[in-house]
Amino acid sequence: MRIVGLSGGIASGKSTVSNLFKAHGIPVVDADLVARDVLKKGTGGWKKVVAAFGEDILQDSGEVDRPKLGHIVFSDPDKRQLLNRLLAPYISFGIFLEILKLWMKGYRVIVLDIPLLFEAKMDKWTKPIIVVWVDHETQLQRLIARDRTSPEEAKNRIQAQMPLDLKKTKADIVIDNTGSPEELKEQFQKVLGHVTKPLTWTEFVLSRQGAFVAFISVFVVVLILSKTL
């Protein structure tokens, strides 16, 4: 199995690239969706976060008011780190379960869409690593336009993440998204060809098909040995 790491920054276009993978039949495990699930009312993650941040972050329904919680953590690095520590085990387990489900279905290539790929140290489990990059000014202007937020709040949200220039140095593949949507799609086609190339032997062994072949091989060897003894 080939597990591809996909990262970027807020308003960099990572979600657009993620959707392109889906459109081409490659399953994507979205860490943001997993994070939403682990914050649902009554879950372990929900209990931890409410205990740490108080019931003021809850809506009348009892669900976490995500924009309110986001405003709190994006303006306070210590609280942001606390939130990440509280949810990291639940998110990691949720991602593992999603990968397991896709493995059981026989998928050979899976994309992990994780904004905090490097911060969570999950980059060591993925190969290749793709980073969607834009320059800082483009990122800032796109975020302001997209979320209709103030320049100050947009800067705080960008600064809360690892700089894209640093992520760029850690990537195997960099997608420059400073251009037009058409240019992005052209780059994506090249990336798609790289990602869908034949599996290496190690990747094949880790796939469901590889595990089946290994099981059959062991069974045949045991059968031969039992007849010769």
Image (cartoon, grey):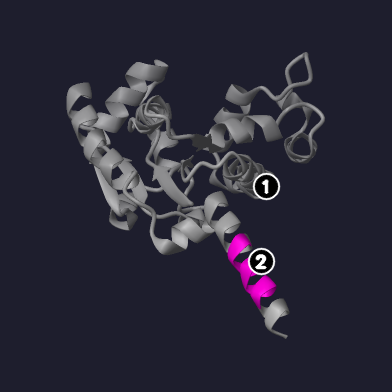
Q: Nearer the viewer, residue 155 or 186?
A: 186
Q: Position of residue 227 (x, y in %)?
A: 70, 78
Q: Amino acid at mark 2?
A: Phe
The spot of residue 103 in percent (x, y) is 58, 45
Q: Are marks 1 and 2 in contact (CB under 8 Å)?
A: no
Residue named by callout 2: 219
Q: Which residue is at 31% across, 48% downward?
A: 197
* Label 1 Cα crowd, 10 Å radius (few <14 / some 14-19 / many 20+): few
- Foreground label between 1 and 2: 2
**Which of the 4 image quadrants contains residue 133?**
top left
Q: Quadrant of residue 170?
A: bottom left
Compared to residue 85, the image places residue 152 above or below, namely above
Residue 190 placement (x, y as % from top left) = 22, 40
Which residue corresponds to the image point at 26% horizontal and 46% vertical from the top-left?
Answer: 174
Write down the quadrant of residue 228 in the picture. bottom right
Q: Which residues are magenta?
A: 216-224
Q: Is residue 148 magenta?
A: no
Q: Residue furthest front?
A: 227
Residue placed under numbered mark 1 in the picture: 93
Q: Give whichever of discs 1 and 2 has the lower sequence position.
A: 1
Q: Is residue 181 left or right of residue 47?
A: left
Q: Does 196 sit left or right of 222 as displayed?
A: left
Q: Amino acid at mark 1?
A: Phe
- Residue at image coords 22%, 23%: 181
Q: Give the quadrant of the C terminus.
A: bottom right
Mark 1–mark 2 distance (CA, rounded to whole Å): 32 Å
